[in-house]
Image: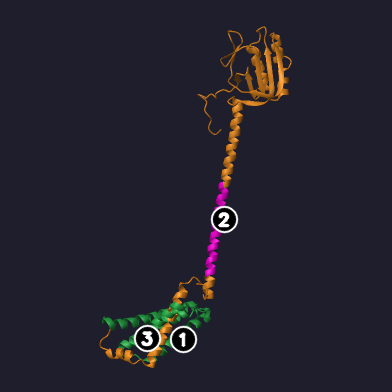
């Protein structure tokens, strides 16, 4: 407190004049207004009493923000769609590859197969039927479009199958001893297969000339259960660019 | 002393009553408060200078408030209310600072 002016302090304290009362009232009004303003400002309704220009700029900002958000939404949706398409394409490719693997497995003899076809029973009472006749029969079946062939329910006939006459009688197919009667199962169009075997000078006549008999039974449900391990090529490699 | 008492009474009243500011008053109240603060600091400085006068204080207080509100009102009508409010606040702020500097010199002699 400034001590050089004690008179003014004492005058205020001892003799409050009308002017000082008015000043007090004004200051009370100031404090009241300040507190009210502070309270109003700390409330959330900041848009009440805002000027037109401010409101317009606020609205502009909001619409800009929502525009940006919409752009972002569109981009994200696009990304999601492309990802979904990718997944779909990948799934389709996988499915196709699996189907192809199945087809190739049946053709290569690594998978069991069922389907319509023929069951051929070759009886050979005189032991005259050998490699020549069987080989001819297998060739005929292949020509007629047989997709899977099996001999005596044990040996699957594939592209690499080898047949030779066995010294103990019978034949050796891929190193397995087979004895008559020979039973050949083939999956394909039954009628075509049966017709192919029945051609004059074909399998049927060859077996009959060798002293055997052929019975062809067409069926809608031929089952080929035997499989073989796929051979790994030692020398051949996939040609690049194929 | 009576002035300080009045200020205290006003603050307490505002805190207790918590009145809502009328919408038409909203743009003017903050400016009016700052203008009143300017008048109060001017009065305090005059008091410390020994030239305080009740009448001058009352007139300057009321005229400050009214002129500040009038300027803001005019600015609103002219479409430059925001800028003019800022201008008024800046001018009043400068005056408050200079008044407070004078008061400080009186109290701390520095």
Q: Are the residues at dot 2 and dot 3 in contact (C-beta closer than 8 Å)?
A: no
Q: Which residue position is annotated with label 3?
A: B3
Residue A187: give x, y in percent of width and height. 67, 24
From the viewer's perspective, tell me whether residue A16 is left or right of residue A77. Answer: left
Give the CA separation, mark 2 to mark 3: 64 Å
Towards the viewer: B21 or A138: B21
Q: Chain of mark 2?
A: A
Q: Is residue A88 above or below residue A99?
A: below
From the viewer's perspective, tell me whether residue A139 is left or right of residue A5. Answer: right
Q: Which residue position is annotated with label 2?
A: A74
Dot 3 lies on which element?
helix
Of marks 2 and 1, the one in the foreground:
1
Which region is colored magenta? A58-83
Q: Residues within 10 Å of mark 3 (few under 14, many from 20)?
A: some
Of marks 3 and 1, the one in the foreground:
3
What color is chain B drawn in?
green
Give the CA separation, mark 3 to mark 1: 21 Å
Q: Is residue B46 above or below residue A242?
A: below
Q: Which residue position is annotated with label 1?
A: B66
Q: Chain of mark 3?
A: B
Earlier along the polypeptide chain: callout 3 or callout 1? 3
| Residue A63: in magenta span | yes
What color is chain A drawn in?
orange
Q: What numbered label is drawn on residue A116?
A: none
Residue B46: give x, y in percent of width and height. 33, 88
């Amino acid at each position: 407190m400034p001590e050089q002016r004690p008179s003014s302090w004492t005058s205020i304290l001892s003799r409050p004049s009308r002017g000082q009362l008015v000043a007090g009232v004004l200051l009370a009004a100031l404090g009241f207004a300040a507190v009210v303003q502070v309270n109003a400002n700390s409330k959330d309704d900041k848009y009440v009493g805002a000027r037109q220009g401010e409101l317009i700029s606020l609205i502009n900002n909001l619409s800009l923000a929502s525009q940006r958000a919409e752009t972002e939404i569109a981009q994200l949706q696009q990304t999601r769609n492309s990802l979904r398409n990718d997944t779909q394409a990948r799934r389709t490719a996988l499915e196709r590859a699996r189907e192809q693997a199945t087809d190739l497995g049946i053709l290569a003899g690594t998978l069991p197969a069922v389907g319509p076809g023929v069951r051929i029973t070759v009886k050979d009472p005189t032991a005259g039927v050998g490699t020549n006749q069987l080989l001819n029969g297998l060739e005929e079946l292949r020509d007629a479009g047989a997709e899977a062939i099996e001999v005596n329910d044990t040996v699957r006939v594939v592209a690499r199958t080898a047949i030779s006459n066995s010294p103990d009688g019978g034949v050796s197919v891929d190193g397995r001893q087979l004895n008559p009667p020979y039973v050949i199962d083939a999956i394909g169009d039954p009628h075509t297969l049966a017709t192919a075997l029945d051609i004059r000078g074909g399998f049927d006549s060859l077996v009959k000339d060798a002293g055997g008999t052929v019975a062809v039974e067409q069926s809608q449900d031929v089952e080929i259960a035997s499989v073989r391990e796929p051979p790994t090529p030692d020398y051949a490699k996939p040609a690049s660019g194929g | 002393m009576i002035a300080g008492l009045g200020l205290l009474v006003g603050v307490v009243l505002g805190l207790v009553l918590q009145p809502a500011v009328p919408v038409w008053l909203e743009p003017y109240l903050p400016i009016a408060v700052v203008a009143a603060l300017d008048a109060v600091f001017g009065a305090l400085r005059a008091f410390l200078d020994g030239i305080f006068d009740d009448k001058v204080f009352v007139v300057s207080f009321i005229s400050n408030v009214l002129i500040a509100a009038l300027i803001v009102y005019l600015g609103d009508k002219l479409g430059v209310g925001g800028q003019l409010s800022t201008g008024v606040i800046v001018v009043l702020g400068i005056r408050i600072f200079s008044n407070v500097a004078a008061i400080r010199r009186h109290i701390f002699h520095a």
